[in-house]
Image (cartoon, helix red, strand yellow):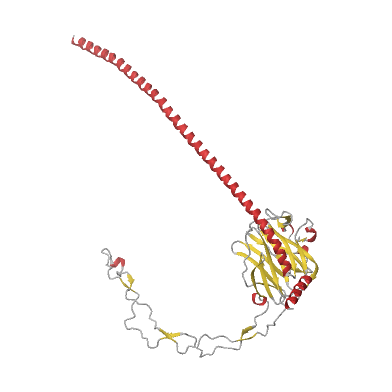
Amino acid sequence: MALYFLVLACLASSVFATDHFVERFDDSKWEDRWIYSTYKGSQMGKFKWTAGKFYGDAEKDKGIQTSEDAKFYGVSAKFEKPFSNEGKDLVVQFSVKHEQNIDCGGGYAKIFGKDVDQKNLHGDSPYMIMFGPDICGPGTKKVHVIFNYKGKNLLTKKDIRCKDDEMSHLYTLIVKPDNTYEVRIDNEKVESGKLEEDWDFLPPKKIKDPEAKKPEDWDDKKQIDDPEDKKPEDWDKPQHIPDPDAKKPEDWDDEIDGEWEAPMIDNPDYKGEWKPKQIDNPNYKGEWVHPEIDNPDYTADDKLYKHDDIGAIGFDLWQVKSGTIFDNVLITDSVESAEEMAKEFEKTKEGEKAMKDKQDEEERKKQEEEDKKRKEEEDKKKAEEEDEDDEEEDADKKDEKKEEPKEEKEEAKEETKEDTAEETKEPEEEKKEDETTEETKRDEL
């Protein structure tokens, strides 16, 4: 009988489950369903309809992709009928693919009320829930889960890490009517807990009693000075003393340089400031704990999870480097429906990974070929340069050999000139000697 009612409950759950919004971006008319914000004019970027560079199915895996760097993006779609999640699960699910290897930018979605101004959507537009990944540098890689409660946007106290690779990932937020929640990535739970504990929806249940005061005789010192401990009589020594090894310089003149004083050095007998040893305090009562009382401002709320007139979903974000693809958007009250979509998404991931691995392998081989070709060209160029150097060296040697006979001829020619000059010089000298002799003879006569 118990099994019968369990099966009946499951069937009833599936029969009455409602998918409030489903968007797979499977046709080119998606822009008829989604409205662009024009709030920031030319600073707003456009989405393009594509499956990206790698995918499982070229048509089924198409989504909307940010296409312009350093732009704001604002696009939203209203549900066919606004709804309240009172008494039911609220599931927000969509896929994000940062195939550009994002450096800084949002990948989150926002849930809006039915009266959202779609054409003027911007960062300060009121929203009910903000959920999804946000990445900026190595320091920010988290999943935002922000709830608006009584006009205030509340950030989670927990650090939920997002995926930061180039592949598609499915982000799921489940908010339950028992005021608990669960966050899944690729249909695996990464965080869960109670709304009241993980967000500051309400003031604390307890506060410190403003009337309570610590008693004046309350002793919270664990240890005290030993009253029996006394400072030794020879304890006090100066920290520095004159250097006993220092000598007055021989050229020191007291009248000119003043009275000589030895330089100071650390005193080896100095023991520092004396402090009595510590003993356990016999009057120690422990740390005084401020008593708490019920907070008069605290009022329990069993409907923290609830939102009325949920009417739209949008992507309102900024990206430095574009290329993020959003797809597989689902707003439902059925966890089972979200899980069914997650199963289909697994097939997408498998095909996407296979294509990406193939591309990476082709890129690796292409790079290896380019590196090999580059190395061959460098080796060839180096060899040609070495051959040119060898040819120049050989040419230089040949030139040297050609110049050697020329130099020898020049030297021989120079020697011939010198010999001729010598031969010419000798008769002249002989002639001069003969003339001198002849003059001498005339003088004698």
Q: Residue at x 44, y 32 (%)?
A: 393
> Against 196, is 39 above or below?
above
Which quadrant does the N terminus fall into? bottom right
Name the spot of residue 305 as percent of width and height, x first. Answer: 72, 75
Q: Residue furthest front?
A: 1
Instruction: Name which quarter of the figure residue 20 lies in.
Output: bottom right
Q: Position of residue 169 (x, y in %)?
A: 67, 62
Residue 232, percent from left and from top: 33, 83
Q: Say which residue appears at 30% left-offset and 15% top-offset.
A: 423
Quarter location, residue 12: bottom right
Which one is in front, 151 or 93?
A: 93
Residue 426 in the image: above or below residue 126: above
Give the residue at x 69% y 59%.
347
Please state which of residues 376 and 387 is positioned toward the viewer in this rendering. 376
Q: Quadrant of the C terminus?
A: top left
Regarding residue 123, the answer to whether it shows in the image is no
Q: Can residue 351 be seen here?
A: yes
Q: Tell whether 399 sits left or right of 193.
A: left
